[in-house]
Amino acid sequence: MADQFAEIVFPNPLKQVFTYRVPGALENLVVPGMRCLVPFGRRRTVGLVTGLVGKAPAGVKVMKSIYSLLDTEPSLTSDLLQLGQWIADYYYCSLGESLFAMLPVEHRKNPITYIELLPDASKAQVELMLQSMPLLRGVNFKSLQAGKVALTPRTKMLADILEKESLIRFSLEGRRSKAKNKTKLGKAQAPPSLHDQQRAALSAIEGALGAGSFKTFLLQGVTGSGKTEVYLRAIERVIEKGQQAIVLIPEIALTPQTVERFTSRFGDQVAVLHSRLSPGERTLQWRRMALGEAKVAVGARSALFAPAKNLGLIVVDEEHESSYKQDKSPRYHARDAAVMRAQIGKAVALLGSATPSLESVHNARTGKYSFLAMPDRVNQRPLPKIKLINLREEWQVRGQDRPVLSMALEAAIRETLEKKEQVLLFLNRRGFNTLTLCMKCGEQVHCPNCSVPVTFHRGLTVKGKPALLCHYCDWKGPVPEKCPQCLDGDIQQVGLGTEKVEEEMKAKFPGARIGRMDLDTTRKQGSHEDIITRFRNHEIDLLVGTQMIAKGHDFPGVTLVGIVGADTGLALPDFRSSEKVFQLLVQVAGRAGRAEKEGIIYLQTFNPDHAAIQAAQRHDTGGFWKNELELRQALNYPPFCRLAILMYQSPDEKKAREAAEKVGQLLDKAAPAYQVQVLGPAPAAMFKLQSNYRFQILLKAAKASSIRQLIQNLDSRMTVPSGVLRVVDIDPQSML
Ligand code: ADP
Ligand code: ZN
């Protein structure tokens, strides 16, 4: 009998692969991609097999053995193992972190399922049976008397064997909910016939699907041009070919309507990987995809890892959304990883947006992606007109009044409500007032844990008093009676939030039904869907909200969109600030006039001449790209270079600073050989966050691999000091 050894990784940042002996009982059963239970330190923990070797590594005397296997089929297919390796290399994390991020939460931990004892099974019988099976070693019998046993391995094969013996009933938490899910699915609807631009786009995609090789498309279609219909048709082809598809959408909880369109077209062939499902339900949906029972997986970022066996297509809807970047390790960008997954699996990647990211635009221009355009709305509906309102002039005319609404917007709202049509009011700031400050010395009240001003919320109280809230760490505190700086008593609240807009609208338009949609009104499960449904059913006349109202919703009754303010985004110290404001304005504007009646937008701004605002007003996406790409090139920012942030953070400011400074010196010497430009260290724009002081070093290079090699070189020469956390963020989406 030849010895067999398994290479195993764990869900921790250690960039090390561990080797375990495969015991005789498990010989030839262990396959890369399977999970197993192994001794690790003093514990027994779940590991993932990444490879098998015939020889133990040199120098290892005592080799521990795998305790039991947790899978009879690999949890991760070879495609996903390969993708995991790419993520680990590219985003500079451990292979364990990237591979475990691909598994459903239940599969990352120890026991995940229960067996239920049937009344006539004796404890001895069950124990004997379980122990006779090598796969089941490691079962915990403690809770046997309670009628349920926590088990480690959850597989169909085991369930079947045990169930056949009629001793137990294997119960996966999700099994019951399967029926429930089915009843929720709507009826299949007759699809509309495609318009010319859709047909042209689809035929290009079909060509690539037929060729069976890797290709990436960037589909730029204006809001309401019918992109989703193109996705649906392409998926239809994929299913006809006997393949599977994955659809990524930015925030699944915020876009129930989008999910609905997939389930109503494809029925129970869809596996919805919803963040609000219980872990058991998620596992069930995941398994339906693995077994090929489901043909389409729809979900947010991590649906990218759906275990499709025969993947034909990955759709990334709203590909420009920054929520596709995970903000903890592994810090992968789901759009870029989706393109990589398609490449590994010889599949087609379809990236869609009305306002593509400049990275994708650049990739389309350089021929890496094929560009498809749908410049017109369905049924030749016009794009809504955008009227700019200069708030500087308005405030001059109206003095110290500082109105929420300009006279023009107020009149337009009144008129729209009188016509029994609907209004959306957008402001990207929640809370009542955004600043609390001393009128004498100008001191702003900041969060004690973060270097950001706190927001005043009417709906919140601390010890019976109105409260301030930090949006970054959830710190709450009372509004101070005196200025903490100069002890003067004239504390005032300024700056506009959605709560205040809502209140003013109620006062101004007492006859109208007014609603608000932001993080604060949608905390309860179902409340978000509830607001959307009521607005769609015209039970709400005027809806105030943050960017939540901009996300792909189809509100046919909306003819007026008022953008109360969007200027704060322009002032952010981030090279993407213009791009983000432009995208947001176009998306918000896209909510108006989607049905028979034309729509109009009133955009209130202090910066009517800003390039992003000017371009949005003219719906001039091409002009915006040209202008912005020229700027990026001149300043050497993405997409013309690659960026990475090295962040050193610690509750101890000195430790964080010293670590960053030492790294800065090492990098200054090493970087030229790697052709990497080093900027910093400098305090991060948000210097203190959740009680951590943060110093950052920005790395710029023509190629991401140069940056990676430089960091590797750094790590070979210096370890991160204890008490300091080092974060590597490749292709950062936020510079704050
Ligand atoms: P986008 O995703 O580009 O904003 P949607 O796919 O949501 O656009 O389409 C907007 C609306 O037009 C939807 O209600 C959709 O059902 C409808 N629609 C899409 N394609 C067609 C078509 N070819 N004919 C008629 N209606 C269509
Ligand atoms: Zn805070």
Image: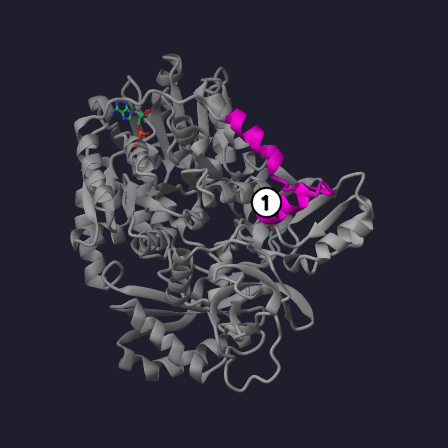
Helix, strand or loop under label 1: helix
Residue 145: give x, y in percent of width and height: 83, 47
Q: Ligand 2 shows up in which quadrant of the image? A: bottom right
Residue where numbered disc 1 is placed: 279
> Which three-letter amino acid code belongs to the residue tagged 1?
Pro
The quadrant where residue 205 appears:
top left
Q: Determine if the magenta segment contains residue 79.
A: no
The quadrant where residue 615 appears:
top left
Segment tinted magenta in the rendering: 156-184
Residue at horizontal 27 percent and vertical 80 percent from the top: 672
Residue 250: give x, y in percent of width and height: 41, 43
Instruction: Give the residue at the far front of this rendering.
Output: 1
Where, quadrant-wise, is the C terminus in this rendering? bottom left
Compared across the picture, whether 232 is left or right of 549 comes to: left
- Does residue 271 show up? yes
Residue 490 or residue 239, whichever sits in front: 239
